[in-house]
Image (tube, rainbow, N blue to C red):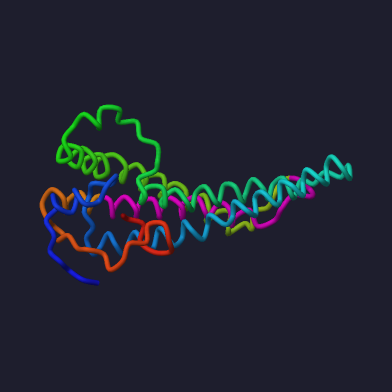
């Protein structure tokens, strides 16, 4: 990794859509979240396959399967939870700050930093603290589907809920450090060793 001590303003101008500079901490955190997100995105293929098999079984063979239905729900939920952090890293998640585009880049960074620190992180922390016991209870009792022919090991899916939110939290912490790099030049901005937003590593451009 090459540290070029780039100023936040110059780095922001060169980054296109995402105006926040990168620092060493955010670069490593983003790589972790992106790796998990890209791996989890293959679950969408599994969701499609399971749904097609279930449709064929139900409407062609007239043999519906509760297990296949539940499997498609669980795969869908797992894929969604494990790719949420990936969307945050790429800044492709849905925003509701309709006035953002009217502010200067510095004002945008201030608002985003305050939103992450004062709203997003505390709320996600509360959600994780509530979901961990929820998943742990399912592990202890080896929870399974209430349907006689449903899936066992439901605790595996329930564990994906706090895990997915944990990756969102990591992505938000990374985002917050990029805001501080832009605003206060701390941590110091760096030039990532390679640009792989659309390949297999760090997602920033």
Question: Does 171 lie within the magenta span?
Answer: yes
Of the 4 image quadrants, the one containing the C terminus is bottom left
- Magenta region: 147-175
Residue 110 shown left or right of residue 85 in the figure: left
Residue 58 shown left or right of residue 16 in the figure: right
Residue 3 shown left or right of residue 80 in the figure: left
Q: Residue 184: image x %, image y %?
A: 10, 51
Whether 2 is drawn above or below 83: the answer is below
Q: Residue 80: image x %, image y %?
A: 52, 47
Q: What residue lies at 24% left-to-right and 72% top-to-bottom?
A: 1
Q: Residue 66: image x %, image y %?
A: 76, 45
Q: Residue 109: image x %, image y %?
A: 19, 42
Q: Residue furthest right?
A: 61
- Along the line of sight, which residue is nearer the eye, 52 or 25? 52
Name the dominant secondary structure of the magenta segment: helix
Q: What residue lies at 30% left-to-right and 31% top-to-bottom?
A: 97
Residue 58 shown left or right of residue 11 in the figure: right
């Amino acid at each position: 990794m090459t540290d070029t001590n780039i100023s936040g303003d110059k780095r922001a101008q060169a980054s296109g859509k995402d105006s926040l500079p990168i620092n060493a901490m955010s670069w490593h955190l983003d790589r972790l979240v992106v790796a998990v997100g890209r791996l989890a995105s293959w679950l969408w293929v599994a969701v499609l396959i399971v749904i097609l098999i279930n449709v064929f079984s139900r409407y062609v063979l007239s043999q519906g399967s509760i297990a296949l239905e539940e499997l498609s729900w669980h795969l869908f939920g797992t894929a969604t939870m494990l790719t949420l952090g990936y969307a945050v890293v790429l800044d492709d998640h849905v925003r509701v700050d309709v006035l953002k585009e009217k502010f200067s880049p510095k004002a945008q960074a201030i608002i985003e930093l305050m939103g992450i620190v004062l709203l997003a992180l505390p709320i996600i922390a509360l959600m994780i603290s509530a979901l961990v016991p929820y998943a742990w209870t399912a592990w202890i009792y080896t929870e399974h589907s209430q349907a006689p022919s449903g899936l066992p090991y439901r605790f595996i899916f329930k564990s994906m809920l706090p895990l997915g939110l944990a990756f969102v939290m990591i992505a938000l912490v990374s985002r917050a450090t990029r805001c501080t790099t832009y605003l206060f030049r701390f941590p110091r901005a760096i030039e990532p060793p390679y640009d792989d937003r659309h390949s297999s590593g760090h997602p920033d451009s």
